[in-house]
Image: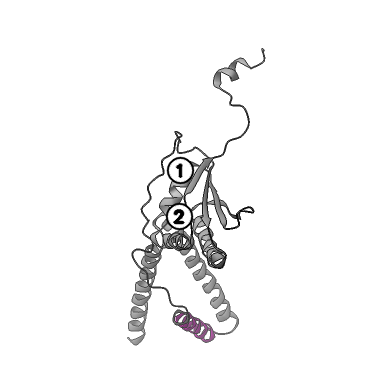
Amino acid sequence: PVAAISLALGGAGWLITWTGIDVSVQLASPRWVVGRTLSIYYALSAGGMAAGSWIWGSVAQNYSLTLALEGAAGALLLVAAAGIVLPVRPWEETDQESSVFHPPDVALDLKPRSGPIVAKVEYLISEENIEAFLGSMRTRRHVQSRAGARNWTLQRNLQTPSLWTETFRTPTWMDFLRLNHRLTAADKEVAQHLLSLHEGEVPPQTVLSIERTTEAIRTRTSTIFSRPPR
């Protein structure tokens, strides 16, 4: 009876813990990437159980069942202790909520697949704020790259050393819009800190452009009539 009760309580605790972790992973993930986060989480969980079964099974086969059970129990205690040393940050509802974004006005008739799009943001930073600015830019690079920015760079103007330019690309216009919708309220705090370091009279403005090749535009008519006779 004691063993049956222990197994029942252990199974109930395992089920509650597993369900709670599943919910925590979903709530702590940005909405646009929650599917990928769950897939990685389930893959690691299933892989961990498979690896644990193989390891402790090998210990039981080569040494003893008692040693395998004691080793598994010790590993669980270490995991529990790790939660005390490295606690999970309390989740807040505003952390993963998408921030408000209004698409910018453009003079060209852009389609969702138009691109590549190049975005440039200029900052005026004084010498005493450069270290803090670079620290915030390291975080911003991670944030922008995670949201979909490519070829992110930071340049300093040689003629005007206080002028810094952040540049990144997105493959299409739709990707640029998605990037800004993916930024959460917590991510926007980085932009607010950069704004506090900016010394210009107006806030940093995002300048958008679209890349174009120098090849001549080929129309359907010119393509048809330029074919060699058969």
Mark seen at residue 45: none
| Quarter the N terminus occupies | bottom left
45 in magenta: no
| Cβ atoms at labels 1 and 2 below 8 Å apart | no
Q: Nearer the viewer, residue 111 or 189?
A: 189
For residue 155, which quarter of the picture? bottom right
Dot 1, how many residues are within 10 Å of its Cα: few (below 14), some (14-19), or many (20+)? Answer: some
Secondary structure mainly formed by the magenta segment: helix
- Residue 209 in the image: x percent, y percent? 52, 41
Dot 2, how many residues are within 10 Å of its Cα: few (below 14), some (14-19), or many (20+)? Answer: few
Tag 1 secondary structure:
helix
Residue 138 to residue 62: above or below:
above
Residue occupying the point 52% across, 55% down: 123
Disc 2 marks which residue? 201
Residue flagged by tag 2: what amino acid is it? Glu
Mark seen at residue 174: 1
Residue 176 to residue 99: above or below:
above
For residue 193, which quarter of the picture? bottom left
In terms of sequence position, does the residue under pointer 1 or pointer 2 come before the other? 1
Q: Nearer the viewer, residue 26 or 49?
A: 26
Residue projecting furthest to the top: 229
74 in magenta: yes
Magenta residues span 64-81
- Residue 56 in the image: x percent, y percent? 54, 78
* Structural distance between the alpha carbons of marks 1 and 2: 31 Å
Tag 2 secondary structure:
loop
